[in-house]
Image (cartoon, helix red, strand yellow):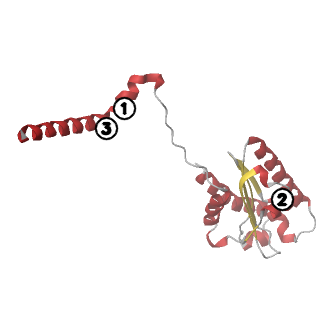
Amino acid sequence: MKCKRFTALLMAAAVSIGAFSINAYAPAAYFESLGANAPVITAQAASPSAAALAKEVRKAYEGGYLPDYKLSKDEIKTRYGVDSSLYSSAFVQIPMISTRIDEITIFKAKDSASKKKILEAVKQYQKKLKTETMQYPSNLKRIQGSRVYQKGKYVCFFMMGDISKSVEESGSDEAIIKAYQEQNKKAVNAVKNKLK
């Protein structure tokens, strides 16, 4: 009697193991048999926050990253005219030293309508900087080389980096502006690579 029970238990275990091994391989065939009705499962990576993108930008400049004062939501609104209701995250940092105007700004808009408003505000901010006359002469070309960049939900403004002394002291205005544009391209590339 005990032998029969033991045999029955062994048979049940074998059936369970067999069923498990079939199920381990069944999904592909199962979904193929369903054809167009098969459920589609997609894994989407969460889009990074503005701060996460800023971290990548900082890495791109190694030891030459100057901004060290992070603006609050109220300060961002005062500076850009962008209300916090338009973005899910924002990162704006400037230097504490007033003689330098390096700036990193990244907005992650809530939707396409919000992005449009943020982009317009950032462009207006850049335009205002370019026409402002109360600037140190050394900063004027740095402003001209600033960059507005947008991708997906993100709107960025970059005005950072240092150029060589030789270009700064003896280069033409065009060469100096181009050198600053190249510096800001580092930030753009850092964001592009993170959003791939």
Q: Is residue 84 above or below residue 99?
A: above
Q: Is residue 29 above or below residue 54?
A: above
Direction from residue 39 to residue 122 in the image, left or right = right
- SS of the residue under disc 3: helix
Q: Out of 189 and 45, give the one closest to the viewer.
A: 45
Q: Is residue 36 above or below residue 10?
A: above
Residue picked out by circle 3: 24
- Badge 1 crowding class, 10 Å Cα cut-off, few under 14, some 14 to 19, many 20 or more, is few
- Residue type at mark 2: give it: Lys
Label annotation for residue 77:
2
Residue 175 position within the rendered picture, expressed as x and y whole percent measured from the top left: 77, 61
What residue is shown at x 68% (from left), y 70% (from top)? 65
- How far apart are the alpha carbons under marks 1 and 3? 9 Å
Direction from residue 49 to residue 118 in the image, left or right = right
Residue picked out by circle 1: 28
Q: Out of 5 and 172, give the one closest to the viewer.
A: 5
Location of the N terminus by quadrant is top left
- Residue type at mark 1: give it: Ala
Q: Which tag, 1 or 2, sits closer to the chain's start?
A: 1
- Badge 2 crowding class, 10 Å Cα cut-off, few under 14, some 14 to 19, many 20 or more, is few
Q: Which tag, 2 or 3, sits closer to the chain's start?
A: 3
Q: Out of 175 and 64, give the one closest to the viewer.
A: 64
